[in-house]
Amino acid sequence: MRLINRRPGRALTLFLAMVPFALLIGAYSVGSELRLAANPQDKLLPSLATIGETAQRLLTEPDRRSGRILFWHDTGMSLLRLAVGAAIAALTGLIAGLAIGLLPHVRATLTGFVAVLSMIPPLSILPILFIIFGLGETSKIVLIVIGITPFLIRDLSQRVLDIPREQIVKAETLGASTLTIAARVALPQILPRLIQSIRLSLGPAWLFLIAAEAIASDLGLGYRIFLVRRYLAMDVILTYVLWITLLAFVIDWLLKQLSRKAFPWMEAGL
């Protein structure tokens, strides 16, 4: 049997999935031990035990000034900003994608404009957002929206264009209006794609969020990482990085489960 036709069983799949993580942890552990053996005061690669102790302290010990556990406040604020920005981007992308995909006049007007917007590096306009919207929450949310909305619009509009023309013609034959076609024919077919597109956009969304929080914020995961960098507190930084990675994985998994439950006829394979 050719290798291309061989598929691992469930147990082997789980084992193979864990191998890269085990190798990464092993490589880090070896590197940390070598550096600490040469210099016990080295801060660049703290031991796994040190990272564990730091994580326990961050998760449980309240701040001396405020009495709050800053780790959870940072997490809540960052998740709120991410959720609001992603929701606005998703709604905008859905409406614009439907309009561009179904209406030729809108498509002729907006296709080029959205394509140009998608080429602008969002981080390059962050200073402009701070000037226009100030250093508060609005500028951070707007950065996420600007960063991922063009991709959502282009992806969803293409999905609408890929709908077989015969389906639209049949709906027109039955007397369906443009709004009815959008709601009854196009919308059910692009909602699964919307969830998948949001999943693909989570990585850039986190990047924009962390960058905005690092530059102008007094609370949030990105703010805390850049605050402690001056002290070379790698144990704190790595704890926050691992936590952000875990949050991103859980959000992606939840969206995948939502897609499977809501649209069982669509394979949420991403």
Image (tube, rainbow, N blue to C red):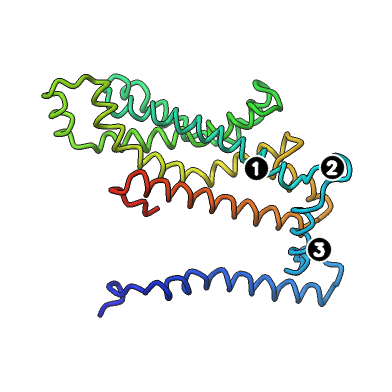
| Residue at image mark 3 | 43
User: Disc 1 vs disc 3: Cβ atoms closer than 8 Å?
Assistant: no
- Snapshot quadrant of residue 108: top left
User: Disc 3 vs disc 2: Cβ atoms closer than 8 Å?
Assistant: no
- Identity of the residue furthest to the bottom in this view: 1
Q: How far apart are marks 3 and 2 (CA)?
A: 28 Å
* Position of residue 155 measured from the top left corner of the image (x, y, whole percent): 37, 38
Q: Distance between the residues labelled 1 and 2?
A: 25 Å
* Position of residue 158 measured from the top left corner of the image (x, y, whole percent): 31, 36
Q: How many residues crowd around disc 1 within 10 Å: few (fewer than 14), some, or many (20 or more)?
A: many
Q: In this view, does 43 lie to the left or right of 84?
A: right
| Residue at image mark 2 | 67
- Name the image quarter holding the N terminus: bottom left
Is 256 in front, or is 99?
Answer: 256
Is 218 in front, or is 32?
Answer: 218
Quick check: 16 above or below 97?
A: below
* Position of residue 204 measured from the top left corner of the image (x, y, whole percent): 54, 43
Secondary structure of residue under mark 3? loop
